[in-house]
Image (tube, rainbow, N blue to C red):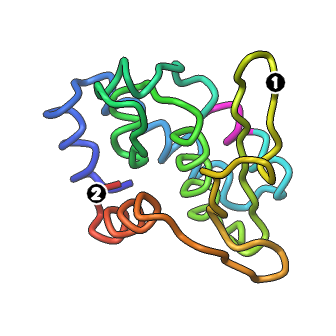
Amino acid sequence: MTKEIELKATTVYGSRAQNRFKSIEKSLLVKLQNKPEMTKLNVVNTWVNGISYKSDKETYGVNDYWATLYKFVGKNKGDCEDYTIAKYYILKELGINPNRMKFTYVLYTNRLVLPASKRSDIIKVVKMINGDTGPKSKKWKKLEANMKRKKL
């Protein structure tokens, strides 16, 4: 997190957002840098899960929107994949090898929880342990491009 991102967050989302970005820097990136992997995983998981759940429809007015880390933390709300994306980028910044990360989520409809292998809309978000990246969706490619352009 840079000072520029913190200041932009204040302008766009208010001072509380700036405090959340400072917390990522101080409470996560600095304090966890030399901690064991399990500590990193647990602390990041708890921190990100503290952000409020809101559907994409409520937050953005559309059925499905993949928020960048910046938007998710800035707005302080998001849905399933937004939590996953935030955890991925924070853990990656903490030195967790993306080749070792695997994130999935399930669709809960009519009291039936479908495993990822049964969902037609799930894509492999990060490389699996065997190195197979699988197909990447347009949404993931757009998200990666935004991250590269520092649109966190």
Nearest to the eye among marks 1 and 2: give it.
1
Given contact means CB atoms under 8 Å apart, are the residues at marks 1 and 2 in contact? no
Q: Count neighbours of disc 2 (C-alpha within 10 A) and say few if under 14, some if 14 to 19, many if 20 or more.
A: some
Quadrant (top left/top right/bottom left/bottom right) for the N terminus: bottom left
Query: Which sits in the foreground, 80 or 138?
Result: 138
Q: Which segment is the magenta one?
A: 43-47
Q: Looking at the picture, how far across and down is residue 58, in whole percent? A: 36, 17
What residue is pinned by disc 2?
A: 151
Residue at figure coordinates x 20%, y 32% from the top left: 10
Three-letter residue code for mark 2:
Lys
- Circle 1 SS class: strand
Left or right: where does residue 42 sit relative to residue 71? right
Three-letter residue code for mark 1:
Leu
- Circle 2 SS class: loop
Query: Which sits in the foreground, 149 or 19?
Result: 149
Residue at figure coordinates x 75%, y 60% from the top left: 102
Left or right: where does residue 142 sit relative to residue 117? left
What residue is pinned by disc 1?
A: 112
Query: Which sits in the foreground, 145 or 36?
Result: 145
With respect to residue 11, does 59 lie above or below? above
Residue 94 lies in the magenta stretch:
no
Quadrant (top left/top right/bottom left/bottom right) for the C terminus: bottom left
Residue 45 lies in the magenta stretch:
yes
Q: Looking at the picture, how far across and down is residue 134, in whole percent? A: 66, 75
Q: Count neighbours of disc 1 (C-alpha within 10 A) and say few if under 14, some if 14 to 19, many if 20 or more.
A: few
